[in-house]
Image (cartoon, grey):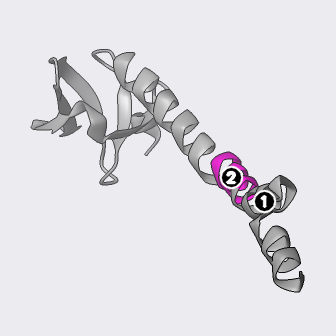
Amino acid sequence: MISLAFAQAAGGSDTSSTLSQFLPLVFMFGVIWFIMIRPQMKKAKEHKAMVEALQKGDEVVLQAGLTGRITKIGDNYLHVEIAEGVEVTIQKLAVGQLLPKGTLKTM
């Protein structure tokens, strides 16, 4: 009789204990999503929109820290004049920041 009682108690499944085991994992994923992943996706979306809106004559800061003025725009590459008579070809994604007009003259 006692062995039968132990078998019944061991065989029963408790769904609330299973849910309580996975609840901390779900909570941690939610925290990571809102603290790390979501802001990174928002920043990438803003950078993509900025790169697509670049025009000839815009003043930019490259991710390497160089500043210059866009002279030519291609599909994937830009020509940037970093000094008088010095022009470099870079990928569009290497543009880190768009500067207000006239910023290069004040530097």
The residue pinned by badge 1 equals 13
The residue pinned by badge 2 equals 35
**Which quarter of the figure has residue 79?**
top left
Label 2 vs label 1, nearer the camera: 1
Q: Is residue 43 left or right of residue 27?
A: left
Return the x and y of residue 8 as percentages of the image width and height: 83, 68
Q: Is residue 66 left or right of residue 90?
A: right
Disc 1: CA contacts within 10 A as few (<14), some (14-19) or many (>=20): few
Camera-side residue: 5 or 74? 5
Q: Which range of residues does the magenta coloring cover?
A: 26-35
**Which quarter of the figure has residue 77?**
top left
Work out whether residue 99 can be spotted: no
Position of 15 relative to 94 (above/below): below
Check disc 1 and give the amino acid type: Ser
Return the x and y of residue 42 as percentages of the image width and height: 57, 34
Which secondary structure, mark 1?
A: loop
Q: Work out whether mark 2 precedes mark 1 in sequence or the reverse, and give the earlier one.
A: 1
- Give the alpha-carbon distance from disc 2 to disc 1, as whole Å: 35 Å
Return the x and y of residue 66 as percentages of the image width and height: 30, 49
Please give the name of the residue rendered at 19% of the width and 35% of the height, measured from the top-left corner: 91
Please give the name of the residue rendered at 75% of the width and 66% of the height, measured from the top-left corner: 11
